[in-house]
Amino acid sequence: MEINLTGFLLVTGCGALLCILWFFLSRRAEAGSGKSALLSLLILVLGTVLGVACARLVWVLCMISYHPPLFALSYDELSYYGGMAGVVLAVCLAAKLCGENVRKTLNAFAPMGALLAAAIRFAEYFLGDFGLGAWMEEGLFFPLTIEFNYGDFSEFYPAVFMLEGIFSLIAMILSLVHRDEKYRWIRTLFYLCLPQIIHESLRWVSISWRFVRSEQLFCFLLCEGVLIWYALRAEPKKLRSWVPALTGLLVCGVVIVAEFAKDGKIMPFGHMMSQWAIYGIVAATLALMAFMEHKGHKRLTNEE
């Protein structure tokens, strides 16, 4: 499976430039061309530096038991969500340096950040089997599966990177719909991370510590943290405020059971349909968690 780092970097770079141009044009009417250009340039530079640095740092921390070197770069030794954290940090620092309100800047950048997340995922097309799932006996159609033709035979793999990119675009659309909301960037992060709970389980290559997929855990903790934050900000003394967060814990339990079942540690699942049935149950519980996020946010805004 051929790896084309030039193609990956080109798509990622073009995606970053497109996002920054979009951000500049959206901010120009409100803040003026000069200030918007400076803010956009700072986000681009700091986002690149801090994104790569945090992606590497988080990967090293996840793999610390193997004593990996800190200062080394490889496409498969970076944390995607560590990089996302670095970009968020870059937006905060750029806003501070330009004297802008941090929350408003994060809200304004939220859909562009989701578009950047999608661009990086789509760019994984050039990384061989890095963004794919486990081997399949029979393929479906692109973008659900991808085929590698070797002349006499073909191999089929789930194109997980395409699903991740598509769901990132959905998060971008939701961010545009929520353009006037106070917590727009928090909700965008929630909907970027929520689908990854199932996507990370589908990926063949992932950051793992023993049987725990680190980025799957990170994404769940962020989503659950948002639900807990809603409860604390709304009416923390009332049980109804905690229903979304408690539902999130129930979802966590389902995901854990599903992971063990998928690996045949609870009961043997010999057929692929059984595996996909498990993923269907997980997807349904994640949809429930998304509904609870909507209810939690609505209750918070009503209280405020």
Image (cartoon, rainbow, N blue to C red):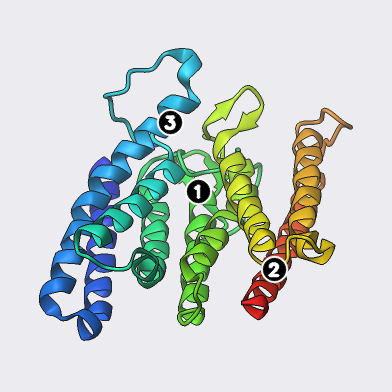
2 or 3: mark nearer the eye: 2
- SS state under label 3: helix
The residue that label 3 is drawn on is 59
Quick check: 124 above or below 78? below
**Viewport quadrant of the C terminus:** bottom right
The residue that label 2 is drawn on is 296
Quick check: 70 above or below 86? above
CA distance for labels 2 and 1:
42 Å
Instruction: Pick out the residue farthest to the bottom.
Output: 29
The residue that label 1 is drawn on is 147
Work out whether residue 77 can be spotted. Answer: no
- SS state under label 2: helix
Quick check: 143 above or below 82? below
Instruction: Pick out the residue farthest to the front.
Output: 237
Residue at 22%, 63% (x, y): give it. 17
CA distance for labels 3 and 1:
29 Å
Residue at 27%, 51% (x, y): give it. 47
| Location of residue 72 in the rendering, given as x and y in whole percent from the top left corner | 28, 25
Kind of residue at badge 3: Trp
Instruction: Pick out the residue farthest to the left.
Output: 34
Residue at 18%, 57% (x, y): give it. 42
Tally of numbered tags: 3
**Viewport quadrant of the N terminus:** top left
Q: Which of the two discs, 2 and 1, labels the residue nearer the N terminus?
A: 1
